[in-house]
Amino acid sequence: MVVLEKNRDQLYEELNDRVDAMISAGAIDEAKKVLEMIAGGKVAKSSPLLRAIGLKHLLQFLSGERGLDEAVSSWKRDTRRLAKRQWTWLRKFCGPAENVRWTHSHERYLEEIRSFLMV
C-alpha cells in the first residue's frame, strides 16, 4: 500500500474549498429536502443521517439556530477534525512497514509506487 500524505495546511485548505463547492452546488437545497422529509415523517428526528457532517450544520441554519456563516464555519471545522481522526487512525494501523510505504511527494508518487511494486 502506498499512502500519499498531504501537507496538513494544504489538506485543510482543500477541505474548506470542498465545503464551499458543496454549498455552491446546492447543499442548502438538499438540506431543505431533508427537512421536508422530516416534517413529512419520512425521516425520523432520531435518524443517524441527521448527524452527518454538513447536513447537521445546514439543518441548524435552516431551523434558525445558527447563521449561515457560523454553520459553514462549523461544518468546515468538523470536516477538518474528521480528516485529522482519519489520519490518526491510518498512522496507527497502517504505519510505515514492509508492505506500507508513505510518501509526501505527490510529484514522484508514481516512482514510489513502481519502486514499491518491484520489491
Image (spheres, rainbow, N blue to C red):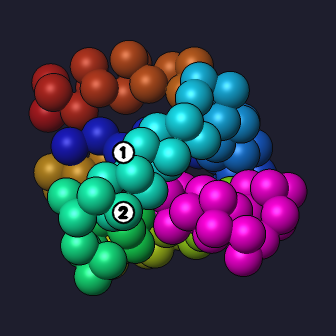
Q: In this rendering, does residue 113 appear at all?
A: yes
Residue position marked by numbered label 1 in the rendering: 3
Q: For residue 57, which quarter of the picture?
A: bottom right
Q: Position of residue 93 (x, y in %)?
A: 24, 73
Asked if the magenta segment contains residue 71, the reply would be: yes
The range drawn in magenta is 53-75
Eyeballing the image, is 43 above or below 24?
A: below
Of the 4 image quadrants, the one containing the N terminus is: top left
Q: What's under tag 2, amino acid-wise?
A: Ala
Q: What's under tag 1, amino acid-wise?
A: Val
In the displayed structure, does residue 55 sit left or right of residue 57?
left
Eyeballing the image, is 20 above or below 9?
A: above
Eyeballing the image, is 3 above or below 70?
A: above
Q: Position of residue 32 (x, y in %)?
A: 51, 46
In the displayed structure, does residue 30 sit left or right of residue 96?
right
Q: For residue 62, which quarter of the picture?
A: bottom right
**Furthest residue to the bottom?**
46
Q: Position of residue 77 (x, y in %)?
A: 69, 67
Residue position marked by numbered label 2 in the rendering: 39
Q: Of the residues under marks 1 and 2, which one precedes in the sequence? A: 1
Query: Of helix, strand and loop, which one carries label 2?
Result: helix
State the residue at coordinates (28%, 58%): 40
